[in-house]
Each structure stands twice: as C-alpha cells, then as structure tokens.
C-alpha cells in the first residue's frame, strides 16, 4: 500500500456541521474503498491565494492515509462531483525520504488532534458526572 496525502478545500459559506459532514463523507469514501486513514488535520478557515468560484476563503482539511492506487480514482471522482469542494490535491509519497517526511506529518497531525479529543472527553465526563449526581 502506498502513502497518500489529500488536501481539499470546502466552501466558506457552510456551517460547522455541514463542513464536518463533508469531511465525514470523504473519509467514508476512503473507508469504503479499504484505505487506512492515519490522520486528519483540520487547518480551518484560511485565505485562498486567488479567488476560486468567487470565494476568497475556504476551509482546509488534510487527510493522511495508506491505500492502493485504484482508491485515488474513486476518491477524486467523489471530490469532483461534490459541489461544496472547491479545490483538492492528492500527493503520493514514494521514496524513503518522502515516507519519512510523511510519518512526521502524520505524527504532527495526531499530536495536534489529541488535545481536542482530550478536551471533549473531559467535557463528556463532566456532563455524565453532573447527570449522575442529579
């Protein structure tokens, strides 16, 4: 299996729930095709280098995964037909140096997502504790 990174940008007019749904839709395509999702990096709302479909900003998300080459065709087909995705790019990491860099990026993305997961867990624990006490 090869290492891939897919960056995609969704429209800035979407709500947080709609943006999360778009990310979930793309990860579902990867799961359905048998890809191994290693990390997700939500970069958030950023300014685009140039206007794309009259949008000056966009919500950036990067997916790091391992998959067979045939998965990329299906992934990019789904990104093309999705009207909420305004740009996307897939990069394949092939030689040893690139794969070492890929591993560093995956580790950094996982490290960035851990505080958010821990914060959510703490809030959930507090909510459960409060409901049990009541």
Image (cartoon, rainbow, N blue to C red):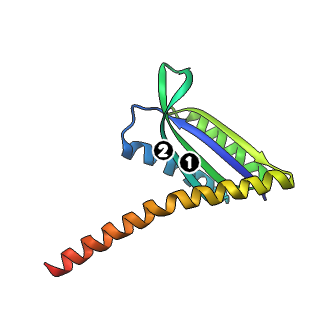
Q: Looking at the rendering, in which quadrant would you find the C terminus?
A: bottom left
Query: Looking at the rendering, which quadrant does residue 124 occupy?
Result: bottom left
Query: Looking at the rendering, which quadrant does residue 100 occupy?
Result: bottom right
Check if mark 1's residue and mark 2's residue have beta carbons within 8 Å: yes
The answer to whether residue 31 is visible is no
SS class, disc 1: helix
Above or below — where is 56 with respect to 29?
above
Q: Nearer the viewer, residue 37 or 100?
A: 100
Q: Position of residue 97 (x, y in %)?
A: 83, 53
Q: Which residue is identified by label 1?
A: 26
Q: Taking 3 as reference, is 94 left or right? A: right
Q: Residue at x 86, y 52 (%)?
A: 95
SS class, disc 2: helix
* Mark 1 to mark 2 CA distance (whole Å): 6 Å
Q: Are there few (<14), some (14-19), or many (20+) residues within 10 Å of tag 2?
A: some
Query: Looking at the rendering, which quadrant does residue 14 occupy?
Result: top left
Q: Position of residue 8 (x, y in %)?
A: 58, 39
Q: Residue at x 43, y 43 (%)?
A: 19
Q: Position of residue 117 (x, y in %)?
A: 44, 64
Q: Taking 23 as reference, is 64 left or right? A: right
Farthest residue to the left: give it. Answer: 134
The answer to whether residue 95 is visible is yes
Q: Taking 115 as reference, is 98 left or right? A: right
Q: Residue at x 65, y 38 (%)?
A: 77
Above or below — where is 100 with respect to 52?
below
Q: Which residue is identified by label 2?
A: 22
Numbered badge on residue 81: none
Q: Nearer the viewer, residue 18 or 102?
A: 102
Farthest residue to the right: give it. Answer: 95
Q: Residue at x 67, y 60 (%)?
A: 34
Q: Are there few (<14), some (14-19), or many (20+) residues within 10 Å of tag 1?
A: some
Q: Looking at the rendering, in which quadrant would you find the N terminus?
A: bottom right
């Amino acid at each position: 299996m090869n290492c891939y990174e897919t960056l995609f940008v969704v429209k800035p007019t979407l709500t947080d729930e709609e943006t999360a749904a778009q990310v979930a839709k793309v990860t579902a395509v990867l799961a359905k095709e048998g890809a191994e999702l290693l990390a997700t990096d939500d970069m958030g709302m950023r300014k685009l280098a140039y206007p794309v479909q009259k949008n000056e900003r966009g919500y950036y998300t990067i997916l790091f995964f391992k998959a067979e080459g045939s998965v990329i065709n299906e992934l990019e087909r789904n990104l093309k037909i999705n009207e909420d995705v305004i740009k996307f790019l897939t990069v394949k990491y092939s030689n040893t140096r690139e794969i070492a860099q890929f591993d560093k990026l995956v580790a950094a993305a996982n490290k960035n997502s851990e505080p958010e997961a821990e914060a959510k867990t703490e809030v959930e624990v507090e909510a459960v504790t409060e409901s049990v006490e009541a």
